[in-house]
Structure formats: C-alpha cells, structure tokens
Amino acid sequence: MSGLYDLVKTVHILSATVLFGTGLGTAFHMWSAHRAGDPRTIAAVARSTVRADFWFTTPAVVLQPASGIALIHLSGIAPATSWLAAAYGLYLLIGLCWLPVVWLQVRARNLAMSAAANGAPLPAEYHRVMGLWFGLGWPAFLGTMAIFWLMVAKPDLW
C-alpha cells in the first residue's frame, strides 16, 4: 500500500503545483499585458492564458479532489478532520472564484481581439472585466496558500 500511497501523494502534490504555478504564471502575464495596454498584446497573452487554463489548470482541478479523496482513504484520516474541512471550504471558495475568472479571461481576450482588429482602444467593458478578474484572483491566490499551509501543518482547528 505504501507504493500506491506515494504515487497518489505525488499526483496530489504535482497537481497542486500545477494549480498554483499555472495560476500565478498566467495571472502575472495577464496583468503585465493589461498594464502594457496594447490590445494586440493583450489578445495574444489572453489567448495563451485561456489555453493554459483549459490544458493545465482544468485537469489539475479534477485531480486535486480525486487524489485527495484517495489519500484520505489510503491514510485512514477521518474525512471530517478540522484541517481537512477547512481545506474543503477553501477549495470551494477558490473554485467559486476560478470559474468566473476563466469566463472573464475569455471575455477580456475577445474584447482585446475586437479592439485590435478594429484599431480601436480598449473599451470600458474591458477595464471592468479586468477589475473583476483582478478582484477574484486575490481570494483564490490567498486560499491556495492557506490550503498549502493546512496540508503541511495539519492543525487541529476545532
């Protein structure tokens, strides 16, 4: 059983790394492109960001709870342990932030592509979309960091 546990734990750690790393990397690139203000640059970066979310983040989002459930089962930890319950809640919060962020990235990409194709400046809606994107990114980022801490420290919260 140790071999299976180690394999599942490795998958869990790698998928968490992909979630955090891809999220941080794509956010950095989207924000950098946004700050540059050029619709062509924003469209190109947003295209890559949307692809990265679908190719990397989405599978990791599925692997995280699947491998987490398997780890709970293999380790014998009570599923209702306080630090796990806190992690479940944070994962749900992150998901509730991430789903609209994906849609907002698609919308920002489309608005930037349209502006670039027409030689027009970015519309006000683009700036509103990016403000929401930025605002939703913070709780997801902080929630992810909190889950990492919970997984390492395994505190008795209540």
Image (cartoon, helix red, strand yellow):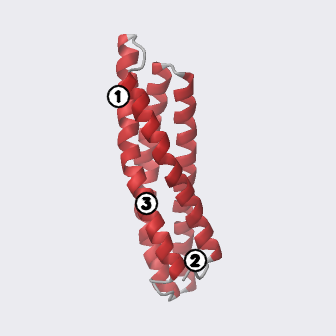
Q: Which residue position is annotated with label 2?
A: 6
**CB contact under 8 Å: marks 2 and 1:** no
Q: Which is more toward the observer, 141 or 19?
A: 141
Rendered location of residue 55, percent (x, y):
42, 48
Q: Which residue is mark 1?
A: 110
Is residue 102 shown left or right of residue 17?
A: left
Q: Say which quadrant the C terminus sits in.
A: bottom right
Q: Position of residue 79 (x, y in %)?
A: 45, 83
Cα gap from disc 2 to disc 1, whole angstroms: 43 Å
Above or below, 84 against 145 in this view is: below
In the image, farthest residue toward the right: 153
Q: Nearer the viewer, mark 2 or mark 1?
A: 1
Residue 129 placed where, x, y %? Answer: 40, 34
Q: Quadrant of residue 102?
A: top left
Q: Does dot 3 land on a helix, a strand or a loop? A: helix
Amino acid type, label 2: Asp
Tell me the amino acid under the disc marked 3: Leu
Measure the alpha-carbon separation of dots 2 and 3: 28 Å
